[in-house]
Every structure is written in structure tokens, then in C-alpha cells.
Amino acid sequence: MTSLDDPEAIRHFQSLCDACQELTSRYHGPSELRLYADGYLHALRRSGALDPRQQHKLEQLIDRWIMDPSSFIGPDGDVSTLFMRQPKGF
């Protein structure tokens, strides 16, 4: 697995993961998380805040992380309700 060794890249990874977790808790699905992550990564790329090598590693890691269903297992541990949860009252 590609690992990040730059503290700034690690902070961006953590920030993006936290934001995606928050979006998931508000019933956003994988395609919406992908759009959010793409926008974040694009803005980061345009800012030039990271070395291109670290940017590439971060992009690869985020791709794998979003595509891995275990990244979003809720506290109940039930994968079957993952992205299909509905807010109460619906």
C-alpha cells in the first residue's frame, strides 16, 4: 500500500477522511463522496501545496479508501445498511 510520509499530506488525508465520514453520516453515497474528494484534491493540486509525488500518493490512497466499504462501517458494524440508511421519518 502506498503510504504518506509527508506530515502535510497526512493532515490533508485526515481532513478529507473526516469530511467524508461526516458526509456519510448525512446520507451521502459513494458517488457524492468521490465528487467531494475530487474537488478537494483538485484544489490541493492547483494550490501546489504538496510535492507532486506526495500529491499523487495522496490521490491513490484516497481512491482506495473511498472504494473500500469498510472505511464507512457505522458503529453498529452492519455493512448491509452502509450508504442505504435513510433518515428517520422517510
Image (cartoon, rainbow, N blue to C red):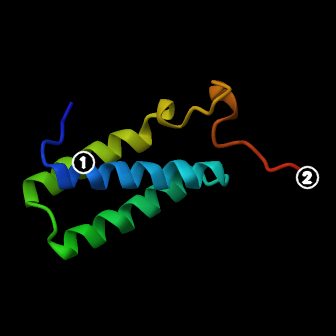
Give the CA separation, mark 1 to mark 2: 38 Å
Quadrant of the rendering where the N terminus is positioned = top left
Q: Residue at x 9, y 60 (%)?
A: 52
Where is mark 2, residue-wise? 89
Where is mark 1, residue-wise? 10
* Residue type of the residue flagged with mark 1: Ile
* Residue type of the residue flagged with mark 2: Gly
Q: Residue at x 70, y 42 (%)?
A: 84
| Image position, residue 53 (x, y; %) | 8, 53
* Residue 68 image-quadrant placement: top left
Q: Residue at x 18, y 47 (%)?
A: 57
| Image position, residue 51 (x, y; %) | 8, 60
* Residue 64 image-quadrant placement: top left
| Image position, residue 18 (x, y; %) | 46, 50
Report the front residue among 55 and 19: 19
Q: Is residue 45 left or right of residue 12?
A: left
Q: Residue at x 63, y 30 (%)?
A: 75
Q: Secondary structure at mark 2?
A: loop
Q: Secondary structure at mark 1?
A: helix
Q: Is residue 31 left or right of residue 60?
A: right
